[in-house]
């Protein structure tokens, strides 16, 4: 899970989302030999509050770990 301070449009416009995905999924996980079960980018513009981030992270964790 990654936290972002800009909106999705900014990440797409500048290629940040692809760059983050490549760095995290391929650069770190492939190097370690670990599978990527999910990769989530949580954006401040979409979630708005710290509690919303925590709630989203909780639900992602529940999906991954049951």
Image: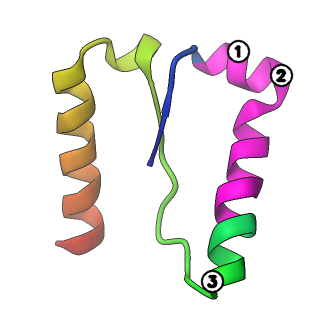
Residue at 69% from the left image edge and 51% from the top image edge: 21
Q: Position of residue 19 (x, y in %)?
A: 78, 43
Going from N to C along the chain, the mark reached first, 3 or 2, is 2
Going from N to C along the chain, the mark reached first, 1 or 3, is 1
Residue at 71% from the left image edge and 80% from the top image edge: 31
Q: Is residue 39 magenta?
A: no
Secondary structure of the residue carrying numbered label 1 = helix
Q: Is 37 situated left or right of 25 in this image?
A: left
Distance CA(mark 1)–CA(mark 3): 30 Å
How packed mark 1 is, by other alpha carbons closer than 10 Å (few <14, some 14-19, many 20 or more), is: few
Residue at 76% from the left image edge and 55% from the top image edge: 22
Q: Is 46 situated left or right of 8 in this image?
A: left
Circle nearer the viewer, 1 or 3: 3
Q: Position of residue 34 (x, y in %)?
A: 56, 83
Q: Is 62 situated left or right of 13 in this image?
A: left
Circle nearer the viewer, 3 or 2: 3
Distance CA(mark 3)–CA(mark 2): 28 Å
Image mark for residue 61: none
Whether label 2 touches label 1, CB < 8 Å: yes
- Check the image and report above or below for 12 versus 17: above
How packed mark 2 is, by other alpha carbons closer than 10 Å (few <14, some 14-19, many 20 or more), is: few
Secondary structure of the residue carrying numbered label 3 = helix
Q: Which span is picked out in magenta?
A: 8-25
Q: Position of residue 35 (x, y in %)?
A: 55, 81
Q: Main secondary structure of the magenta part?
A: helix
Q: Quadrant of residue 24?
A: bottom right
Q: What residue is disc 2 on?
A: 14
Q: What residue is disc 1 on?
A: 10
Image mark for residue 32: 3
């Amino acid at each position: 899970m990654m936290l972002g301070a800009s909106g999705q449009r900014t990440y797409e416009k500048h290629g940040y989302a692809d760059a983050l995905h490549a760095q995290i999924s391929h650069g770190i996980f492939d190097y370690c030999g670990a599978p990527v079960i999910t990769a989530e980018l949580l954006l401040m513009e979409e979630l708005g509050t710290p509690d919303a981030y925590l709630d989203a992270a909780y639900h992602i964790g529940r999906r991954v770990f049951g």
